[in-house]
Amino acid sequence: MTHPVTHPVTHQSMALSEAPGVKERMVHGLGFLPQNLVSYLLGIFVRIQWPKSIQSVFNQSFVALFKLNMREAEKPLGAYRTVEEIFTRALAPNQRRISGAYVSSADGILEISKAALSGSTAVQAKGITYSLTELVLGNKIQDISAKWYTTVYLAPHNYHRVHAPFAGQVTGIRYISGRLWPVNRPAVRAIPGLFCRNERLVFSVDVATGGKAWVVMVGAFNVGRMSTRLSPEFITNAGSRQYKRSTGPNDLLLAAPIPIVAGEELGIFMLGSTTVVVLDEVAAAGLRPQEITTPQTVSMGQGLAEI
């Protein structure tokens, strides 16, 4: 089995993987906070347009604090009017290469890519599993018969746009309300079913090579906003949702299926989060993903299929 070109896991990600138990206990403490409201208020702050001199200091401090790579950004640092614009920055042309029919949906740490356990079950962390059916549908009523899943964690320094990992047609977008727990490794080890608890956007795709797949954007603590160009009027963790919680999954209206190619933009995170790509048996057979169980850095467009 051939493995993709990989990069060493960063010191930041290694620190997370070696975090002592106290970090997990700190994560549990966040349960007492109104996570969505705190994230919403922070979102307001990072969208403030300050006077140019003040904004310049904020922008430079933000880039230095999170060690953002602005050399690959679409615009120079001074052109960004808010901190959020920097965070959600687009890439300059030709910064990523699409390498194959099944590729990474985002920059970040590829935590795992492997066959699902029986009952459409995925491994969240050692000793903790979760339901891919619940992740995708918001309930466990109908089994999606998941065959494969690929999980990528986006740290704050990463490029934060999510792209199609394969070609096909987007047939639906589902918004599932929820909390906004952190999604770093201490949180993943501490909160059972974390990805199924958090707010998320789910793109249902008929894969070009056959079968069904889902690209799941999982929201996270701090800002917590997600958006998609396929439904421009919709954005998660908006002000109205602080006062009226959704009672269940909501399907966003699409006039018709939307064709996509591998590497085409699907959505934007407004701070660090996670994507989970889920394939049914037919999709997995056609895309031929390779098993990867050792965390490693990946770039959007990096090939994840067998060669």
Image (spheres, rainbow, N blue to C red):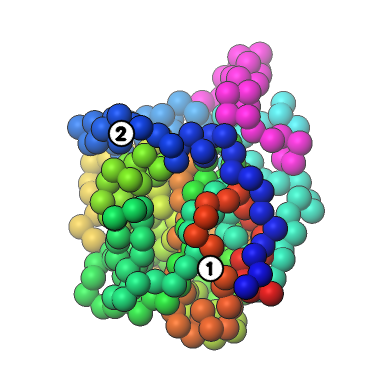
Q: Residue drawn at (57%, 70%), measured in percent from left and top? A: 290
| Prevalent SS, magenta region | helix
Tell me where residue 133 appears, x and y as whole percent.
Answer: 31, 70
Query: In the rendered view, would you say 10 is above or below 264?
Result: above
The image quadrant of residue 240 is top left
Give the number of the disc on residue 12: none
Q: How many marks?
A: 2
Residue name at image x 75 percent, y 59 percent: 97
Q: Residue at x 62, y 52 (%)?
A: 298
* Residue nearer the viewer, 283 or 246: 283
Instruction: Indicate the quadrant containing the C terminus: top left, top right, bottom left or bottom right.
Output: bottom right
Tell me which residue sits at (60%, 60%) in the image: 104
Determine which of the numbered discs, if any, sits on residue 291 in the image.
1
Q: Is residue 236 left or right of residue 243?
A: right
Residue 128 visible in the displayed image: yes
Which residue is under mark 2? 21
Span of residues in magenta: 48-74
> Label 1: few (<14), some or many (≥20) within 10 Å?
some
Q: What secondary structure is found at the residue carrying circle 1?
A: loop
